[in-house]
Image: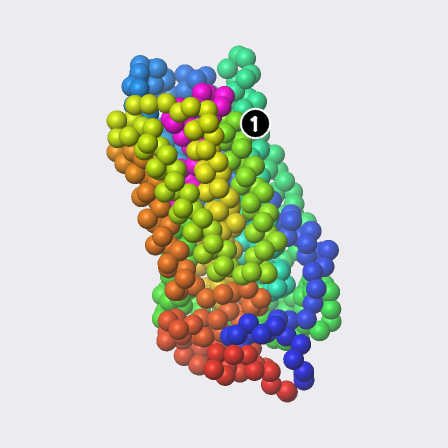
Amino acid sequence: MAGGAFVDNGVGAKDYPGRLTLYVFLSCVVAATGGLIFGYDIGISGGVTSMDSFLKKFFPSVYEKEQANKDTNQYCKFDSQLLTTFTSSLYLAALISSFFAATVTRVFGRKWSMFGGGITFLLGAALNGFAENVLMLIFGRILLGIGVGFANQSVPVYLSEMAPARLRGMLNIGFQLMITIGILAANLINYGTSKIKGGWGWRVSLALAAVPAGIITLGSLFLPDTPNSLIDRGHDEAARKMLTRIRGTDEIDEEYNDLVAASNDSKLVEHPWANILRPKYRAQLTMAIMIPFFQQLTGINVIMFYAPVLFKTIGFGSDAALISAVITGLVNVFATLVSVFTVDKFGRRKLFLQGGSQMLVCQIIVGTLIAIKLGTSGEGTFGKTYAGFLVAFICLYVAGFAWSWGPLGWLVPSEIFPLEIRSAGQSINVSVNMLFTFIIAQAFLAMLCHFKFGLFYFFGGWVFIMTTFIAFFLPETKNVPIEEMILVWKAHWFWGRYIADSDIHVGKNYEMANGKAKNVDV
């Protein structure tokens, strides 16, 4: 194949022929709706646990203590570890289930893992909506967590495998876009159900989780398997036909051969969990741990999890708190759309670095604005104009996250793993994400009480560290076919030392030459 019709990524990887077909676009949209269940739960939990009728029924002791707590300190509001444990228990269930989801995703395919996640989340929503005691409520939370674990494990991998390399970022970020839509929908629903007379609004909020669960459950039944998964499970001819269909061209031999080479490598791996510890996967393993770890330490969950609590804490009324949460939710959705249309043009690194810088500046300003009014005593109030400035900078912070660490925290780990350890790698990504989501949710109110306005400086410090980490250790992955990602790591100044030439079994038509792609006639 002569000529130079490929994208030079500077690492020896090529872009395969093909275009974005309607079939791929619709498949990716349907699969991305798996993000709705995660987003809906993030948004719904904080609102429901602040409803008096919910607390009276399931946590009467918490309700009584909350009513008795008349402390005017704006930093140290009533902190119930019991309540936050209930809320964040879902994330522990998701953490554990993601390891089982890895096996299901690898053995049965990505779509059945999505289906399992949807059906389990559906059962959890029904249990919670009709809950009569704490046991039903907690069992429902566990089922919700299992559903989230399965969906978060399989959806990003599915999207990265189905998408053409040059549009993988855009299509994968559909998952994060659905998460933000789920959060916004939950905030709006909480606002409406909190107005219901009779004290059963919380049931509506919890039961409506069945809607996003139903969408991904039914949708997954109509999804095609990815060619990567079909080849890995021994359906070579079906994979070739699927690849032809999703690329919209018959010129799929190069991509097909790379998929087969990747599958052959994966079949030599009996124990992916042990194999992932080998030096040649050092870069991918580091990213699968550090990116979700850093994503949670951006402080975004301080804003999104407890948006109603946070705005109430800094002096807003009850209604104003929910309205402010809806405003930040809207910013989240529209800023995520920015990344959808820019990630494959500007690349992952530029969005990471710009978003990180924007978040850092906003966190310093928000912390300082709160310090000026509340000091270390926590005594004080905010005027309307002052509060408006506070909300503006919080929204700028959310926007910075929404076009950087939000979507890229799911995109990058899902696209960097070779097939033989992809399911295991994505499980590590999900489990680290869920573990630190749990820890931050559990510790937030106590940290706010002790750190006071310094909490924003604390997370700002972490944003500085993570932005520096990206600048030095994450290479650009845009336009690189997913099965040729090893060439990116081989060309990197730091990670290349862990990868031997004998470890590279893809991209045979292109050779490395001074870190640049070289087109070779064959």
Which residue shows up at 39% across the image and 71% down it?
495
- Callout 1 crowding tier (Cα within 10 Å): few <14, some 14–19, many ≥20: many
**Residue 310: in magenta span:** yes
Image coloring type: rainbow
Which residue shows up at 35% across the image and 32% down it?
370
Boundaries of the magenta span: 297-321
Residue 67, located in which quarter of the rendered image? top left
Q: Secondary structure at mark 1?
A: helix
**Which residue occupies the foreground of this view, 32 or 392?**
392
Q: Is residue 41 left or right of residue 91?
A: right
In the displayed structure, 294 sits above or below 93; it is below
**Which residue occupies the foreground of this view, 220 or 293?**
293
Residue 23, located in which quarter of the rendered image? bottom right
Percent position of residue 96, x then y: 40, 46
Which residue shows up at 41% across the image and 20% down it?
55
**Which residue occupies the foreground of this view, 506 or 124?**
506
Percent position of residue 399, x then y: 51, 44
Percent position of residue 85, x then y: 35, 33
Instruction: Name the residue carrying label 1.
Output: 189
- At label 1, which amino acid type do we have? Ile
